[in-house]
Image (spheres, rainbow, N blue to C red):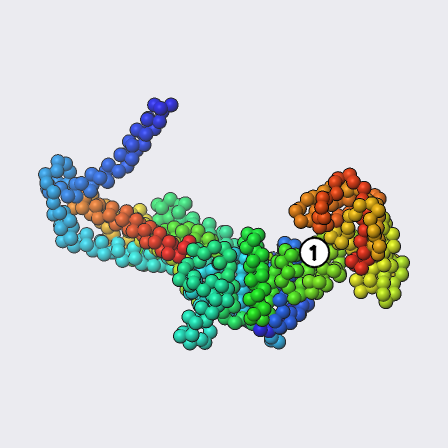
Amino acid sequence: MRWGWHLIRLWSLLVYGFMFLPVAVVVLLSFNASQFGSFPMTGFSFRWFVELWNNDAIMRAFRTSIVLGLLTAVISTTLGVLASLALVRYKVPGANAISTLLIAPILVPEVVLAVALLLFLNFLGLHKSFTLLLFGHVIFTLPFVILVVQARLVSIRRDVEEAAMSLGASPVQTFFQITLPLMLPAVLAGALFAFTISFDDITGTLFWKPGGVETVPTQIFAMLRNSISPEINALGTVMIVMTVGLPLIGAAIARQLARKSGT
Amino acid sequence: MSTVILDKIVKRFGTFTAVHPTNLEIPEGTFLTLLGPSGCGKTTNLRMIAGLLDPTEGEIRIGGKSVNNVPIHKRNLGIVFQNYALFPHKSVADNVAFGLKYRNIPSSEIPGRVQKALDLVQLPDVGDRYPKALSGGQQQRIALARAIVIEPDVLLLDEPLSALDANLREDMRVELKRIQDQIGVTTVFVTHDQSEALAMSDQIVVMSAGRVEQVGTPEEVYNRPASEFVANFLGASNIIEGKCTGKDAETAALDVPVFGKVPVPADKAPHVSEGAAKLVLRAEKLLLMPQGADTTGMVTSEAVVETVDYQGQTVRYFIRAGDRQFQAINMIDGHPFAEGTTVTVGFRPIDCAGLPG
Ligand SMILES: Nc1ncnc2c1ncn2[C@@H]1O[C@H](COP(=O)(O)OP(=O)(O)O)[C@@H](O)[C@H]1O
Ligand SMILES: [Mg+2]
């Protein structure tokens, strides 16, 4: 019995090691002073981060990713909140079917979704564009926002909103005074999800992006095809900090808000 | 403060009729209770008055004006919900002030009015706290303060005490009645608890399965039930089927098994006429006595005690007289009768009511 537990513990350590060691290696190597993006370490240096800063292509990709991520977050969150309200509060006919349809992009493999959207575009006779890329990211991130916001909305009691209306607040005033503040943690979490997923995405982006536009992931992908430059390690570190750090900060803010609102 | 009138109100959900045609007048300043078992349509009626549900048919008038097309936020009503429904993200003072912001009240006056409302519900010092820092009873008081601070035309309360524990519920009952007396607002109170209804109301509307069974003062619905349902819902009653052998201005002569002739006062048997009739005998009016006790003025029978349910100050007996079982609730005087004892049971005819058969 005891041995069994030890084996399981060892096994999970190995699994975690296998998952996180490459990440650790990337972070470690990004501070390597050597010419080559590999071991051995020859000293500690920020030089690859400086190079990154001076690399126009990468900085452009970075700006594209941030703009794309922010727009995706804003649009996805707005649509997600409206859809959740319609589904949870107004009991639109066929709510279940609509809900499934909106959540479906999570279940469909991303490649399939990417190709489908592209084919649809061809069918409409449109060309690839930044707008299409944005559209793809919104479709892809919307389910996450809806899932998070819906879960929260269900837990907000209807009678709290009814109380507000009985006191003289119109439905719109009730939304901004009561419903929105109460679901704010979920709205922020949804927006962060959307941003992070968009910032991270490569499969869909490779299919949808117009020529000449690169996001950070596709830029890394392109650079990898030539050589493994140490800059990539630095870029990897920046990506890790953003995609891990942002949700952590978001979660902390959400918890803070939730505590204040007493729910 | 206004009269509320329900004029031939009907509410259907799909094919299910939750409220059958209902007419009701709630005079200005009245404390009216909708009383009935769960699912009989009390909440549905209340929500139609509130504007949270549209009646399928009929008209609702508040203060003489039809409100069918007036949305809830323009009706100027105070609503208190079963689960308080305080705004969790606002302080107590902000909760109470909420309704004032939508009325033309100078903002300099708001803190004073909030404080007055908090004083009225006897929680003057909790303005800075958040709802979750208050007990259930305190939260319900704040909910009440929030509803009355806007000086509503009508106050609507849907089982506001049922989430509180028993002791607190009785305190709040007294408190609620005091506040209603003080501000004199027309009040519609919903409950399934008959003792709550009897203790607080000016008028009770007893409902069953979407229909009004009886409207009257607590004394009327208790002593002169208009139907078997009302007689059974407000306390325990023995309903004995028999016949009416004659009726004049004074009395209706009922003849029932076991007890024989019972001269019921005519005003307590208004709908009884000669022929089949039922005698309503309240369990607490049926007295158990030792055999041979003085029974002057009573209608009596011999009976055997079958079950004794001891409840402290009172005891509930199930007794058998002839081939029938009756229920009696008596104050305890010394020891309760033991099971198996033969006793004399009796009641005064003026304590009975008659129903048509
Ligand atoms: N939105 C609704 N849809 C369908 N049926 C409803 C709805 N609301 C209430 N009902 C039904 O109407 C009846 C009366 O309900 P309600 O007024 O809530 O009863 P009460 O408050 O007396 O317990 C119940 O049978 C209930 O199931
Ligand atoms: Mg109810």
Can see residue B71?
no
Nearest the camera: A248 or A50? Answer: A248
* Residue under the point 18% across and 44% down: A233
Nearest the camera: A242 or B133? Answer: B133
Chain of residue at mark 1 = B
Say few, some or many: other residues with alpha carbon within 10 Å of mark 1 (under 14 / 14 to 19 / 20 or more).
many
* Residue under the point 24% across and 50% down: A216
Quadrant of image for the C terminus of chain B: bottom right
Determine which residue is flagged by label 1.
Answer: B234
Q: Is residue A106 left or right of residue A56?
A: right
Nearest the camera: B332 or B287? Answer: B332
For disc 1, does the CB lie below 8 Å from ligand 1? no
User: Quarter containing ligand 2?
Assistant: bottom right
Q: Residue furthest right?
A: B245
Q: Compared to B161, does B55 lie above or below?
A: below
In the image, residue A259 lies at what x, y percent? 37, 54
In the image, residue B251 lies at what x, y percent? 85, 63
In the image, residue B217 lies at what x, y percent? 69, 65
In the image, residue A35 lies at what x, y percent? 10, 42
Can see residue B268?
yes
- Marks counted in the figure total 1
Choose top left, top right, bottom left or bottom right for residue A24. top left
Secondary structure beneath label 1:
loop
* Residue under the point 42% across and 65% down: B94
Query: What type is the residue that disc 1 sits on?
Result: Leu
Quadrant of image for the N terminus of chain B: bottom right
* Residue under the point 48% across and 58% down: B139
Q: Is residue B78 left or right of residue B25?
A: left
Q: Compared to B183, does A72 lie above or below?
A: above
Q: Is residue B303 left or right of residue A138?
A: right
